[in-house]
Image (cartoon, grey):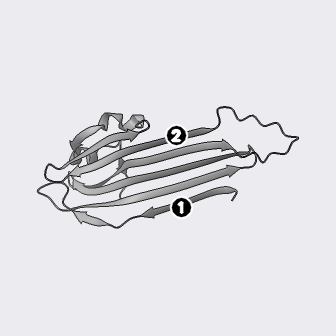
Amino acid sequence: MLGISEEGAAGTLTFEQLIPGGADELWFELTHDRSDTDMGVDEAEYTHTEATVVCGRVDGRVRCSRLLREMSYAREAMGMASEDEEIEHEGLPIDEHTVIEVSFDREAGTVTMEPTEGEIPERIERWRGTHPLVDVLRSDDFALDVL
């Protein structure tokens, strides 16, 4: 299929106490796939992400964080240009894949994020390891907008 295509899905919504002593937090798995095929430049781009979304009450308001678990990015020449066209595909193909193991310690109220494949995105590099979940929910590094 040519053009832009997107698809997303959310898993089962689970209410569970992830931070001791307070109300239950909401968490679920989220997937998103996107493809963009462009005949004009004879290239295709694909992304796939999987994340765990956690929402909880922090400092009197609801905050949600998107914790990346897997991300793939690929860009390639499609090879559909006519023989008359000479299209430069500098730097292609690109094929990047990152996997981050995300786990919760419900008794301690912490989350651990450790890369197991690829490079962790720069904006969340400082969150490698174990941190209080309440700090992750406060951080703009993972924030989802909640009305």
Residue behind mark 2 = 96
Q: Secondary structure at mark 1?
A: strand
Residue 76 point in image, percent of width and height: 65, 42
Outermost residue on the left side: it is 21
Task: Specify the farthest residue to the bottom.
Answer: 12
| Left or right placement of residue 107 versus residue 6 in this view | left
Image quarter in which the N terminus is found: bottom right
Residue pushed farthest front? 116
Q: Amino acid at mark 2?
A: Glu
Q: What is the crowding at mark 1: few (fewer than 14 residues within 10 Å), some, or many (at least 20)?
A: few
Q: Residue placed at 59% from the left, 38% from the top?
A: 94
Q: Quadrant of residue 75?
A: top right
Disc nearest the viewer among 2 and 1: 2
Residue 48: give x, y in percent of width and height: 51, 51
Q: Residue at the right extreme?
A: 84
| Percent x, y of residue 78 | 72, 46
Give neighbour class at mark 2: few <14, some 14-19, many 20+ (Cα, 10 Å): few
- Name the residue at 14% across, 48% down: 108
- Residue 101 relative to residue 105: left or right: right
- Residue occupying the point 13% across, 52% down: 107
What's the CA distance linking mark 2 and mark 1? Answer: 20 Å
Secondary structure of residue under mark 2: strand
* Residue name at image x 56 percent, y 40 percent: 95
N-term mark: 2 or 1 = 1
Percent position of residue 104, x then y: 23, 51
Residue named by callout 1: 7
Amino acid type at mark 1 = Glu
